[in-house]
Image (tube, coloured by chain):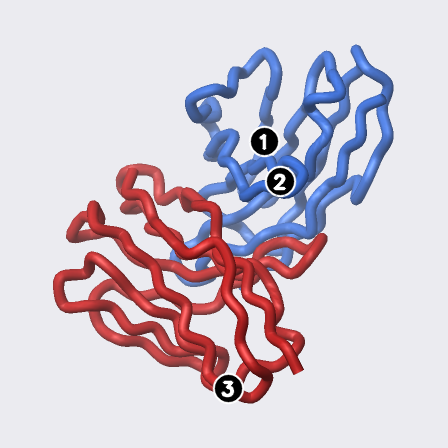
Chain colours: A red, B blue
């Protein structure tokens, strides 16, 4: 299973963009990159996912490098409610179980 | 996306006893997953549960300790057997469906005394 590496913690000023990096150098061609976040005592919440193209939704943008060995999650205008642990996950292909294997995540603190 | 109801939300149990956690989904889903989150840690996958077949356990987890049932496409249970204080964790179920992505329950906070 491909592993991910993320910084343990990051700070971001409220209203600024939060850029969360992730390394996944052993990712296979059919494995997707997923991002989830977990706010204290709650179940993980889906943010975004992608294969090789950049993706954007109402919550965030996902930038995947051309070689797919790393990606960046961008929260364009961070708010205090975005304070959470953010997990970058490489999803095993569906025909191999389709499971999500969590790394240690990045604890993002958004400060006033 | 699918909505998951997980019960109980929390429990305090005596060591040596067992607790069964239920996970109910509001739609039929292909795969269900059970995770453990120890205090201050990330989520660790315990097993994958597919309907009509035995669960597939990850390294370090065994069926005798964490028996799983998956009787239909909307329901699964995880039992934590012969509990010890080291089993104190949050246990979460998750579902996967091609059109729904992955959804997580709110978790069961277990304390073993």
Q: Give the crowd class for mark 2: few <14, some 14-19, many >=20 residues within 10 Å.
A: many
The chain holding disc 1 is B
> x, y percentage for residue A55?
32, 76
Q: Give the crowd class for mark 1: few <14, some 14-19, many >=20 residues within 10 Å.
A: some
**Residue at 71% of width from left, 45% of height from top?**
B6
> x, y percentage for residue A105?
48, 53
> Tag 3, which secondary structure?
loop
Q: Give the crowd class for mark 3: few <14, some 14-19, many >=20 residues within 10 Å.
A: few
Which one is nearer the viewer's eye here, B28 or B61? B61
Q: Which residue is mark 1?
A: B71
Q: Residue A52: name its quadrant.
A: bottom left
Q: Residue A6: name its quadrant.
A: bottom left
**Residue at 42% of width from left, 46% of height from top?**
A100
Kindly indicate whether the residue at mark 2 contacts the one at mark 3 (C-beta within 8 angstroms): no
> Tag 2, which secondary structure?
strand
> x, y percentage for residue B4?
65, 53
Q: Which residue is mark 3?
A: A16
> x, y percentage for residue A111?
63, 77
**Disc number lying in front (1 or 3):** 3
Q: Residue A85: name its quadrant.
A: bottom right
**Residue at 67% of width from left, 45% of height from top?**
B24
């Amino acid at each position: 299973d491909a592993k991910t590496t993320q910084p343990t913690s990051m700070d971001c000023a409220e209203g600024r963009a939060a850029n969360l990096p992730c390394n996944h150098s052993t990712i296979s061609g059919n494995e997707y990159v997923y991002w989830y976040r977990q706010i204290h005592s709650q179940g993980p919440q889906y943010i975004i996912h992608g294969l090789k193209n950049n993706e954007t939704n109402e919550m965030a943008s996902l930038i995947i490098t051309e070689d797919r060995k790393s990606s960046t999650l961008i929260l364009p205008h961070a708010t205090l409610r975005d304070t959470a642990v953010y997990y970058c996950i490489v999803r095993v292909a569906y025909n191999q179980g389709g499971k999500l294997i969590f790394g240690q995540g990045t604890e993002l603190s958004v400060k006033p | 996306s699918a909505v998951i109801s997980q019960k109980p939300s929390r429990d305090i149990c005596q060591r040596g006893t067992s607790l069964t956690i239920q996970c109910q989904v509001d739609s039929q889903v292909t795969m269900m997953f059970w995770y453990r989150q120890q205090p201050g840690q990330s989520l660790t996958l315990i097993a994958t549960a597919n309907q009509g077949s035995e669960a597939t356990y990850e390294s370090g987890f065994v069926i005798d300790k964490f028996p799983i049932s998956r009787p239909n496409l909307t329901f699964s249970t995880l039992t934590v057997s012969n509990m010890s204080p080291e089993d104190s964790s949050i246990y979460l179920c998750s579902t996967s469906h091609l059109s729904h992505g992955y959804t997580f329950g709110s978790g069961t906070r277990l304390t073993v005394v």
